[in-house]
Image (tube, rainbow, N blue to C red):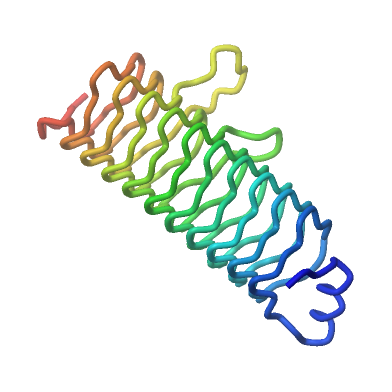
């Protein structure tokens, strides 16, 4: 079903919220209120949806590849198996959203608030989670179990009590950027990284206080300056400093 921006807004104003299986290529909807809508299985590639309120909406299996989603509100949204490949979600809000199995490959996720979100089994290879000019990317208490974060950029992200069990972080960049003047470092305090693949990842200067690394692969991992107080290492040894 092909729909225009005007049709979407008019139908929503008249109480209609089901836009599933719609096609809205390169649509532009800025600063609108479309909360509680159903865009499941819709094609929204290259759309510009900045600062629009999609809270409590359903975008499961939707294609938002290369979309511009600056500051967009996806709080409590169903984004299961949606594609955000190469999309820009800078400073977007995804609190308590469901991103199970979503495609975040090469997505720009700087300054996004993911607190409490479910990101199990996401594909986030080369995704950029670094700090934005306005906000720090918040992944605290997020479920990232079995996610593929290989080669991703997580410098200065907040990952307090995040679940990264079984996650792939091969060659991921979590260490402080060389030329960044900020004192913020990636915080994995009390995070769970059991059986995670951290091979050749850069964790220099990262806070790993109380983190659980039991069974993790640290082959070639850079841990220079990392804070490992009370961390559980791959062999079960607890670091007491």
Any part of residue 10 in sight: yes
Q: Give the residue displayed 66% in from the left and 35% down from the top.
A: 132
Q: Residue at x 10, y 34 (%)?
A: 236
Tell me what residue is drawn at x 57 percent, y 32 percent: 130
Q: Position of residue 107 (x, y in %)?
A: 59, 40
Decide if residue 191 is on the left or right side of residue 175: left
Q: What is the residue that sits farthest to the bottom in this orientation?
A: 15
**Viewer-side residue, 18 vs 212:** 18
Q: How many marks?
A: 0
Residue 225 position within the rendered picture, expressed as x and y whole percent measured from the top left: 36, 16
Name the quadrant of the N terminus. bottom right
- Find residue 124 and report its horizontal and vertical position in percent: 47, 41
Where is 50 relative to 231, above or below? below
Q: Is residue 3 left or right of residue 144?
A: right
Q: Quadrant of residue 54?
A: bottom right
Residue drawn at (77%, 87%), measured in percent from left and top?
15
Residue 120, given in percent of the width and then of the height, sits at: 38, 53
Q: Quadrant of the C terminus?
A: top left
Q: Is residue 129 visible?
A: no
């Amino acid at each position: 079903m092909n729909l225009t921006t005007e049709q979407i807004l008019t139908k929503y104003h008249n109480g209609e919220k089901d836009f599933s299986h719609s096609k809205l290529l390169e649509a532009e909807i800025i600063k609108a209120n479309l909360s509680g809508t159903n865009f499941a299985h819709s094609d929204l590639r290259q759309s510009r949806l900045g600062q629009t309120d999609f809270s409590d909406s359903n975008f499961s299996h939707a294609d938002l590849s290369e979309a511009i989603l600056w500051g967009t509100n996806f709080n409590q949204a169903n984004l299961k198996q949606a594609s955000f490949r190469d999309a820009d979600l800078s400073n977007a809000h995804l609190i308590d959203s469901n991103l199970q199995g979503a495609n975040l490959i090469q997505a720009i996720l700087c300054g996004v608030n993911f607190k409490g979100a479910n990101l199990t089994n996401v594909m986030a290879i080369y995704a950029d989670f670094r700090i934005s000019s306005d906000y720090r990317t918040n992944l605290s208490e997020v479920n990232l179990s079995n996610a593929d974060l290989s080669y991703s950029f997580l410098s200065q992200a907040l990952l307090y009590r995040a679940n990264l069990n079984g996650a792939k972080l091969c060659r991921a960049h979590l260490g402080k950027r060389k030329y960044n003047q900020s004192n913020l470092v990636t915080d994995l305090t009390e995070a769970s990284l059991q059986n995670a693949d951290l091979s050749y990842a850069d964790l220099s200067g990262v806070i790993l206080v109380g983190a659980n690394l039991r069974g993790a692969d640290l082959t070639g991992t850079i841990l220079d300056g990392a804070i490992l107080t009370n961390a559980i290492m791959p062999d079960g040894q607890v670091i007491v400093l």
